Image (spheres, rainbow, N blue to C red):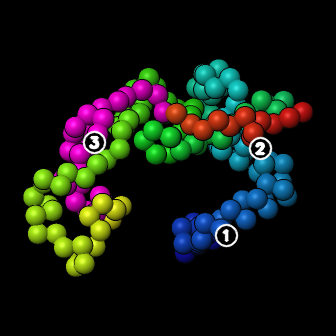
């Protein structure tokens, strides 16, 4: 096994905390590493322009300039408030990138799932475990659709990230 394979293997099995502290420490040790990590994890203010520039230059691997570092304004990968999935704010946020239900998933007590349900034996009817295990026993209050169907969400639009003003890089 080469050193590189060994390292990739170690990265695969390292804990999230270990990877976090390693990334933090190499960013502090090396300006090049710092610039590369900024490029991977932060999104610049003028997102569209930068995506175009990258396409023209044909590479996104070069270290970014100091001037550009000042222009980063938010994390590149955000978790969407609507669909609760992670998305790339640079490449994955078109007008229909996100699909979600606006309302809550409500239990449908008339469904056969619950006919012989005994909470003492089977656990709570209306909790996260039964929602994921028996989605057919639930209905979306927003559109009346039954739970458990993929790509059946009643709303679509761009993803919605949290407000990241607090991350803004100041000069
Ligand atoms: Zn819905
Ligand atoms: Zn979304």
User: Which residue has dot 1 on it?
Assistant: 18
Q: Residue at x 65, y 20 (%)?
A: 49
| Position in image of residue 110 (x %, y %) | 12, 53
> Separation of disc 2 and disc 1 at Cα?
21 Å
> Separation of disc 3 and disc 1 at Cα?
40 Å
Q: In the image, which disc is placed on residue 53?
A: none
Please state which of residues 25 and 116 is positioned toward the viewer in this rendering: 116
Q: Earlier in the sequence, mark 2 or mark 1?
A: 1
> Separation of disc 2 and disc 3 at Cα?
45 Å
User: Which residue has dot 2 on it?
Assistant: 35
Queried on whether the Cβ of the residue with tag 3 lies below 8 angstroms from ligand 1, the answer reads yes
Q: Look at the numbered discs 2 and 1 and tell me whether their residues touch, using CB distance below 8 Å.
A: no
User: Hey, which quadrant is residue 23 in on the image?
Assistant: bottom right
| Number of the front mark, 3 or 1 | 3
* Left or right: 98, with 169 as reference point: left
| Position in image of residue 107 (x %, y %) | 25, 52
Looking at the picture, does residue 86 appear above or below residue 10? above
| Position in image of residue 114 (x %, y %) | 15, 62
What span is in magenta? 130-159
Instruction: Check if residue 113 falls in the magenta segment.
Output: no
Q: Residue at x 34, y 62 (%)?
A: 127
Q: Look at the numbered discs 2 and 3 and tell me whether their residues touch, using CB distance below 8 Å.
A: no
User: Which residue has dot 3 on it?
Assistant: 140
* Left or right: 31, with 126 as reference point: right
């Amino acid at each position: 096994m080469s050193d590189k394979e060994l390292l990739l293997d170690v990265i695969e099995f390292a804990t999230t905390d270990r990877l976090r502290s390693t990334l933090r420490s190499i960013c502090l040790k090396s300006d090049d590493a710092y610039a590369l990590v900024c490029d991977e994890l932060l999104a610049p203010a003028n997102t569209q322009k930068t995506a175009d520039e990258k396409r023209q230059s044909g590479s996104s691997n070069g270290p970014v300039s100091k001037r550009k570092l000042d222009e980063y304004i938010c994390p590149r990968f955000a978790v969407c408030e609507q669909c609760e999935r992670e998305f790339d704010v640079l490449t994955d946020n078109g007008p229909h990138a996100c699909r979600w239900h606006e309302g809550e998933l409500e239990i449908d007590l008339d469904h056969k799932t619950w006919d012989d349900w005994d909470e003492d034996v089977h656990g709570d009817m209306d909790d996260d475990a039964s929602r994921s295990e028996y989605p057919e026993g639930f209905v979306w209050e927003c559109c009346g659709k039954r739970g458990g169907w993929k790509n059946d969400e009643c709303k679509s639009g761009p993803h919605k990230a949290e407000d990241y003003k607090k991350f803004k890089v100041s000069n």
